[in-house]
Image (cartoon, grey):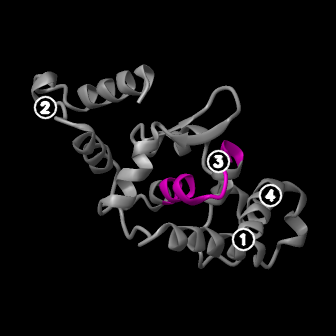
């Protein structure tokens, strides 16, 4: 973990605990740090869980615009609703400093590679986590198929170009 993500995370934890002495409550190790971060995310926030899954299992790092579209719908949606696309601040901010947007290339990654390793090793308190990387990629693929199956796909094809790129790259890796 670089200096900036550590500083951001410590500030985040201290901000959340203004009423107590901050240093008494800091995590003992990296595992506890990630556990505390996940506990700070609202359990009902299905979009945060999807951000973590996409970052962990997409066949390549996604640009922020791609990730915004990828988490804008649920598998049971039948039509595309562009008003459901979250802001870039939401996408990065909803995961308690576990993901970052690279300011140089606009790609969204884990703050450190060990975040993905932690998620694959431990039970995620936000909801069901794929049992294996293959299951994670299949779940991402299900979202791609759902996206391509929207009844209004043709009318919105041009404005939805970014997720098409993700779909192509996932399908080409299968």
Crowding near the residue tagged with mark 3, few <14, some 14–19, many ≥20 C-alpha atoms within 10 Å: some
What secondary structure is the stretch in magenta mostly built from? helix
Disc 4 designates what residue?
A: 165
Circle nearer the N terminus (4, 2): 2
Circle nearer the N terminus (4, 3): 3
Q: Is residue 133 found inside the magenta-colored segment of the image?
A: no
Disc 3 designates what residue?
A: 61
- Residue 75 location in percent, x, y? 59, 75
Quadrant position of residue 1: top left
The total of numbered circles placed on residues is 4
Label 4 sits on a secondary structure element that is helix
Look at discs 2 and 3 and give the one toward the viewer.
3
Disc 1 designates what residue?
A: 147
Q: Residue at x 19, y 30 (%)?
A: 17
Label 2 sits on a secondary structure element that is helix
Crowding near the residue tagged with mark 2, few <14, some 14–19, many ≥20 C-alpha atoms within 10 Å: few
Q: Residue at x 75, y 70 (%)?
A: 171
Residue 122 circle label: none
């Amino acid at each position: 973990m670089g200096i900036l993500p550590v500083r951001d995370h410590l500030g985040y934890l201290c901000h959340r605990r203004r009423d107590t002495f901050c240093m008494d409550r800091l995590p003992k190790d990296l595992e506890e740090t990630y556990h505390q971060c996940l506990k700070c995310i609202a359990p009902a926030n299905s979009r945060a869980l999807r951000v973590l899954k996409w970052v962990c299992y997409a066949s390549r790092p996604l640009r922020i615009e791609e990730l915004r579209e990828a988490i804008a719908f649920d598998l049971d949606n039948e039509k595309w609703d562009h008003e459901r696309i979250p802001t870039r601040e939401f996408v990065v901010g909803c995961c308690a400093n576990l993901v970052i947007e690279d300011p140089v290339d606009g790609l969204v990654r884990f703050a450190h590679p060990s975040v993905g390793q932690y998620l694959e090793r431990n039970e995620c308190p936000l909801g069901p986590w794929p049992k294996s990387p293959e299951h994670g990629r299949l779940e991402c693929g299900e979202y791609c198929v759902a996206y391509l199956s929207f009844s209004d796909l043709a009318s919105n094809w041009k404005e939805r170009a970014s997720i098409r790129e993700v779909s192509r790259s996932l399908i080409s890796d299968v």
